[in-house]
Image: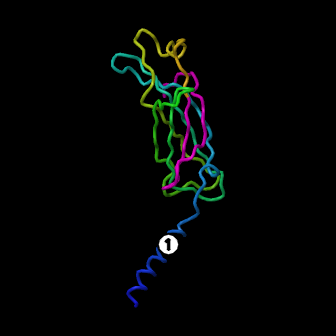
Amino acid sequence: MMRVLRPAFALVLLAAIASSCGPRVDARQALQVTDVSTGWFDAGIVQGKNKLVPRVSFRVKNVSSQTVASIQFNAVFRVVGDVQELGSMLVRGIGPEGLAAGQSTEVYALQSALGYTADPPQTRLQMLQHDQFQDAQVEIFAKPGSGQWVKLAEYKIDRQLLTK
């Protein structure tokens, strides 16, 4: 009879330990996107053409009263009005050491691998001013640990040239 109780006790103990690892974080409530800058990054010359890709940089502030840990961030870029993804970039974000209440992260700079190209001599600035240039937007998502992705913010990509 003791052999049956030991595995059952072990399962109860594991469940108790797992539930005591800390409260579930509502990333949408705990995190605020700050210091946002968007634009078109000069990706250089690719296959003989000037290339621009959409980019967003931002910080995330912990606006909750508890430490937030293990958060990934994903930026999804789309042409305005289009459901098709133009590209995305994922970063680890906040590690297991956590981000204390009231603190902000370092600056994250995320960009799409896809963008627009043009043959020289058209300059990158002329590309942004071209009548066929289509604006883009970015959605920033967060994922706590093994939780679900939640949307934190959405921004239109400014028609400005970024070189850094």
Viewer-side residue, 92 vs 5: 5
Question: Residue 2 colored magenta?
Answer: no
- Give the total of numbered labels: 1
Residue at horizontal 57 percent and vertical 56 percent from the top: 68
* Quarter of the figure with residue 43: top left
Display colour scheme: rainbow
Residue at horizontal 58 percent and vertical 42 percent from the top: 59
Where is mark 1, residue-wise?
15
Residue 28 position in % (x across, y down): 62, 49
Residue 87 position in % (x across, y down): 45, 32
Judge from the rendering whether residue 27 lies leftward or rightward of residue 41; answer left or right. Answer: right
- Which residue appears farthest toward the bottom when viewing the image? 1
* Magenta highlight range: 137-164
Q: Is residue 10 above or below residue 91?
A: below
Q: Is residue 20 above or below residue 130?
A: below
Residue at horizontal 61 percent and vertical 42 percent from the top: 33
Question: Residue 162 colored magenta?
Answer: yes
Residue at horizontal 61 percent and vertical 37 percent from the top: 35
